[in-house]
Amino acid sequence: MSDFVGGIASRRVAALRVVIVSYPVAMVLLIFLALGFGGTVTTPAVVWGALCGVSQAFGVWWFYAALGSGPISVVSPLTAILVAGVPVGVGLALGERPSGVAYAGIGVALIAVALVSREAKGDEDRPHRFTKKVAWLTVGAGLAFGLNFVLIDQAPVEARLWPLVFARVAASLLVIGIALASANLVVPRGIPLKLALAAGVLDTIANVAMLLALQASLLSLTGVLISLYPAATVALAMVVLKERVTRWQAGGMVLALAAVAMIAVG
């Protein structure tokens, strides 16, 4: 839901102007939650949290930009494949060996990318198309989000929610600096502001759930299961925005979700 709301806001104003509102809001909320949860603040918690924040900053910025320019029902599933793939790749580098089902899932994911990326005849007239720019933003966002899972998973469990606080502090400072350098340090008004505030609240809930899940289970499994989030984003895009998808794209989205499930099982 946070992705959908943030994407809608980014269709009205620059993505950076949405993030400079949603991230500080999430930071303040996380500080209050962290104080309630307790936990021990250590150097590893600060370092891993800050590194995670850098990855999150670029991930959300690029993702909102992709959602703002391209079709949400296409961008979201493709991002999820990369989000699922990065933890698997890190697991391989650390010596983990997935099963044949997981390898098959990777193959299905590649087919899904090809199908979802296809545009129907006449799509050149659509305002939100899957262009090369949108494709690169999607890839960048997926890699950044996947790395986010890997980094935050390294934070000590005894720190509770504090790594998320330091992540949001680092991310907020980074996006504000980028916005200032690119002349985008302008707080949106009206509906975009309300959407940005809502995205910040929803993003806080999602990140707390993410960290608690990572602390309670394996990185490779949890990271991939979290990647099933496009189901809600795509459903909202099709119901609320009436986004049109071709049969090939619909088949590709189904394969994308199947690929995520296969990688998780493997």
Image (cartoon, rainbow, N blue to C red):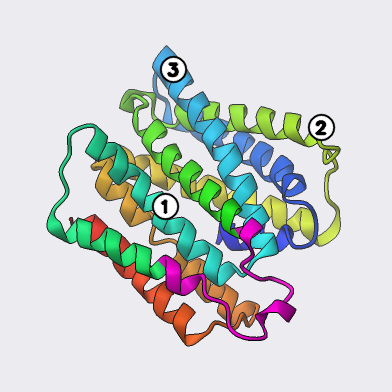
The alpha-carbon separation of the residues under discs 3 and 2 comes to: 31 Å
Furthest-top residue in view? 43
Q: Which mark is residue 180?
A: 2
The answer to whether marks 1 and 2 mark residues whose Cβ atoms lie closer than 8 Å is no
At label 3, the amino acid type is: Val
Classify the position of the C terminus by image quarter: bottom left
Considering the image in quadrants, where does the N terminus appear?
Answer: bottom right
Q: Which residue occupies 24% across, 43% down?
A: 217
Numbered tag placed on residue 82 in the rendering: 1
For the residues bearing labels 3 and 2, Cβ distance under 8 angstroms: no
Q: Quadrant of residue 114?
A: bottom left
Question: Gap in Å between the C-alphas at discs 1 and 2?
Answer: 30 Å
User: Would residue 132 be visible to someone looking at this image?
Assistant: yes
Q: Which mark is residue 227?
A: none
Q: Earlier in the sequence, mark 1 or mark 2?
A: 1
The residue where tag 3 is placed is 41
- Dot 1 alpha-carbon crowd within 10 angstroms: few under 14, some 14 to 19, many 20 or more: many
Q: Which residues are magenta?
A: 113-134
